Structures are given as structure tokens and as C-alpha cells.
Amino acid sequence: MLLQQMQKRIKEIIQSKIVITDKNWSYYVKMVPFFNWMTQYLTHPIWGPVMKKISTLEDFDKQFSQGYIVPIHQNVDYKKSAKNSVLPYNMVKKLIKEASYCVVMNKCFCRDGSHCRNYPADFGCIFIGEGCRKLVTNGIAREVTVKEALAHLKEAADMGLVAMCLWMEMEAYGMGLSEEEHKQFLEICLCCPCCCIGLKNFNKMGPDIMRRFGNIGWRASSREGCVGCGLCAQVCPMEAITVNTDSISVSDVCLGCGICSTQCPQNAIGMDQVAPIKKSLLDYFFGFRPDV
């Protein structure tokens, strides 16, 4: 018991020194290129286990970091979708409406650190839950109403961004949340394909990390008008697309992110529901349920 108390106290002291605030934000975002570089070593036999330990990703049963990809751009073929399907965009809206507290980050960590040229760096992610109050205190986010959060989500959908509903232990720690507050927050990351550390590097992370991030039940497929240009295959973070003469084939590793659909110049890719949809996005989390 004494050892556990000492470990907890040491962890709290370190946390107080490294917590991300508006004052040190510019220093942390400079590390984005390093994080991108680091992902290629997550499968390394020596460095991989070390980095997973630091990132609290080494123990699948005890460490809960995980997330789900939610296409929110609404490019859905309603004729092919089941009449009773719950659209991903509506699932995220429902999650925000039911949240106890909402904030929007002042800037996107990935876009700011990558000097994004395609999307605004000051268009931040949405965080929900009582634990997110700490982000406002630290000066890196602003409190918003449900109406404002929904408007922000719609703007993200209009831009063709991808929503990732994430619960990341390492990020909660870096943002200053106590262990008691960890489960009281959830990220609704609004990600661009060009800068997001996760989307850019998913296929390099290895199966033990990839199984923490799931598809809620949607998959890309070709529509009439495909000319086989191959752009979809280039932007797919999972290399799940094979290009044919006038169509594409999509493998089971598709995350359902919808990037290919938003980037297709012919509007010839749609998203189909391929698995039953649960009542809430929170129902997808395993081992625990975020209290937001």
C-alpha cells in the first residue's frame, strides 16, 4: 500500500511539471513530427514495448486507451442503407446532446504541429465530460453550449473531416486530469487525413494497437461513375482499397473513416452499413464505459 501511494505521488508530481497549458503549447506541438516518426517503431522488438509502456498501451486488459472511427460527412447512399440504420453523424450529435459538459480545443494539436495547409489549425476537437473542465482551466480549450458544439460538428462534417471518438489515458494524463477524472472525459477528434497522427500511421502501429481502434459498422464501396483514378487508394490510411478499371474493391481492414469518399473527385464512393449499429457510441467501449 505504501509503495502504491509513493508511485501515485511521484506520478502526480511529474504530471504537474508536464501538463499542457496555453503557455507551453507551442513547445509541445513542435513534437508532432517526432510522434509521427515514433510510430514506425511501435512494432520494433526492442523499442516497441518501451514506447507502448510509456504510452500506457502495453497491457490490453488493464490499459483502456481505445477509440472508434465515425464518418460524419454524411455521404451515405440511403437506398443501400437499411431503413432503420442510425447514421454516424446522428450518433455523434446524440453523444454531444447527452454530455454533461462540452469544450472545444482552441487549436488542433496535429494540424498546428504539422502546419496544415488544407484545414485551419485553429479548428479544434470537441471534448465532453466533467473532466474536460481542466482543459479550460489550463487555457487550451473554451467552454461551449450544446448548440455551439453541434454547430462545430456540422462545420467539421462540411469540411470532410473524420470524427474519432477516443478515450486515451496518456492524453488525459498530459492534460492534467487526475486518475479520478480520467473516465470523465472523451475526445471527439475532428481529423484531417493530411495531419492526424493516427490516420496517417494506423497501418504502421501493429495489430496489438490496431485492435484498440474500431469501425462502428460502416465500409466504403464504389458507386457508378468510378474511373479508376486511384486517389482513394492513395488517401486510405489502411491501404484497404484495390483499384480496378471502373470500380474499387475494399478489404475487411477498412476503418469506415470515409476519407476516400470525401476525396473522390467523381463522387463515386459511398459508405454502407455492414454491421448492426449500437444504441450509443459509448456502448462500443470495452472494459469500461466513459462517464461523460
Image (spheres, rainbow, N blue to C red):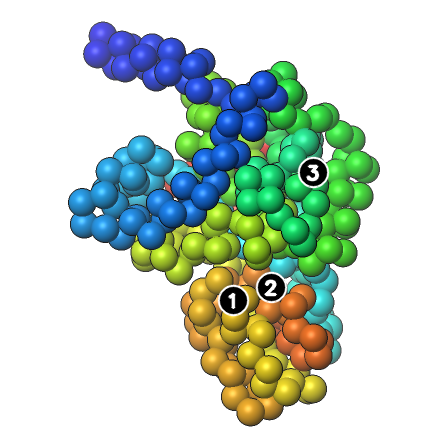
Q: Residue furthest bottom?
A: 245
* Residue where numbered disc 2 is placed: 259
Between 56 and 90, which is closer to the camera in this rendering?
56
Amino acid type at image mark 2: Ile
* Residue where numbered disc 3 is placed: 122
* x 55%, y 50%: residue: 195
Q: Which numbered disc, 3 or 2, marks the residue closer to the eye?
A: 3
In the image: residue 251, left or right of residue 219: left
> Going from the N terminus, do you reach mark 1 or mark 2 first?
1
Q: Secondary structure at mark 3?
A: loop
> Going from the N terminus, do you reach mark 3 or mark 1 first?
3
In the image: residue 10, left or right of residue 126: left
Expressed as whole percent of the image width and height from the top left, the position of residue 115 reads 60, 44
Q: Is disc 3 in contact with disc 1, using a CB cutoff of under 8 Å? A: no
The answer to whether residue 59 shows anywhere in this view is no
Q: Can you tell which mark lies on residue 236?
A: 1
Q: Which numbered disc, 3 or 1, marks the residue closer to the eye?
A: 3
